[in-house]
Amino acid sequence: MRRPRTMAPIVASMVIVAAVSGMSAFAGDGTPVPHPPRGKGERCVADTGFMRKNHMKMLLHHRTEAVHLGVRTPQYDLNGCVSCHAVEGSDGKPVSFASDRHFCKSCHSYAAVSIDCFECHASRPEVQGKTAFVAPADREVAAIDRYLRDIRP
Amino acid sequence: MSTEPQQALPDRRTMLRGLGGAFATLLAPGVTLYAFGANDAQAQASPKVRWALLIDLGKCPAGCDLCVTACREENGWQGNGRAETDAQWIRKVRLRDARTGQDREVPVMCQHCDKPACVDVCPTGASFKRPDGIVLVDKHICIGCRFCMMACPYKARSFVHEPVTDQKPWAPRGKGTVEGCTLCVHRLDAGRPPACVETCAAKGGGAMLFGDLNDPGSEIAKAVARHAPAQIRSDLGLEPAVRYRNL
Ligand code: SF4
């Protein structure tokens, strides 16, 4: 059977579209992987691997401390994440969670995990470029790690 | 007399140690509150403090709504032009004495009661009082049942009926939850006064005095002791933290 010659450009353009959209570029073995935009800060509050695995737990526990006791450690504030990882849209302003290019969205739509943080929280910084980022001491990251290990079922 | 049965009984120290163990377990959930290595000093909500407001209606001109607009700006609760359902964290209520014809306008917001009815009725624990007396809604656990709105004699809370976008980063608010004056808790935790108080002092009549009632040396504690200002519906015994002069 002869494959229609017109298929080649179609496939090629599909690959290009996928690559340009940046959402699901392919890993070496052909598995689509998300490529969330990098943060603007020098470094994150913890290692990338640690953050990938634990960011949701960190946010969950920080929220209780912040709301109920007024513990407002700036580096664990969701606003810090949102400011540092803000992605500029075509209008020059940071995009909101409605956009597929939003830092959180870019991974969460890939992982099919719907989050409701941004039903209430601002998903983009109020003033562009202003970040409240403060690098934490390694000691604090170690404390978080210890704590998360303790509560792990 | 044999000593054996006595040896079988735990001595006082062992018993106390056992109790200590039990307490430690009981306290464990509390320990998680300082999960990230924070300590009491970092927790801004101190049980030693009792935030309060004293509003002098004699200095609050009719028609002035600077406190209302300041709050709206600060917390981003500008509505959708639907007065029936739009949120309102603070409003000016007009009072008119039919006999004397005397008119005055009263800024009314969450009264941050010492014994808040909204906290009593909340089935989820979302409506709570911070250690420093600020009454808040933890929107993470609010189910939007609105029991608190019904319980509040001051009509201080609102339900968010419509989706909200581009909230103020420091004042999260969203559809399906209840909200009200937070006494600008984000500002207090950063050592700044509430937005209404700041604006009233800078541009309005300077009618609002804010401070810690538990500190006998504070302006507000002295003023409250001197003038014995009124509380709205003090007969209900909720002990609101907002007091009024010339009500
Ligand atoms: S609406 Fe929310 S805060 Fe109010 S009583 Fe219901 S759950 Fe509690």
Image (cartoon, coloured by chain):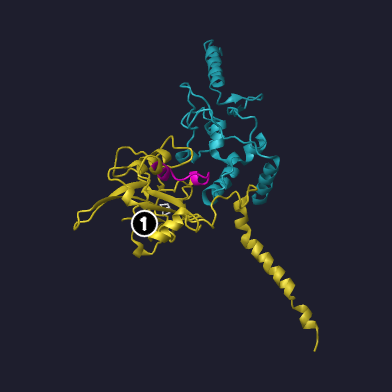
Chain colours: A cyan, B yellow
Q: Which residue in the protein does label 1 denote?
A: B152
**In front here: B153 or B175?**
B153
Left of B22 or right of it: where is B61?
left
Secondary-structure class at tag 1 = loop
Which residues make up the magenta segment? Answer: B186-199
Any part of residue A24 in sight = yes
Is residue B192 magenta-colored? Answer: yes
Any part of residue B123 in sight = no
The disc numbered 1 marks a residue on which chain? B
Is the residue marked 1 within 8 Å of ligand 1, measured from its CB? Answer: no
Residue B157 in the image, given as x and y percentages of width and height? 37, 50
Residue A123 in the image, given as x and y percentages of width and height? 49, 34
When the figure is inspected, residue A146 is found, relative to residue A90, above or below; the finding is: below
Amino acid type at circle 1 is Cys
| Residue at the outermost top position | A5
| Residue at the outermost bottom position | B1
**In front here: B228 or A17?**
B228
Q: Residue at the spot x=38%, y=59% of the render? A: B227
Q: Residue at the spot x=63%, y=34% of the render? A: A44
When the figure is inspected, residue A26 is found, relative to residue B110, above or below; the finding is: above
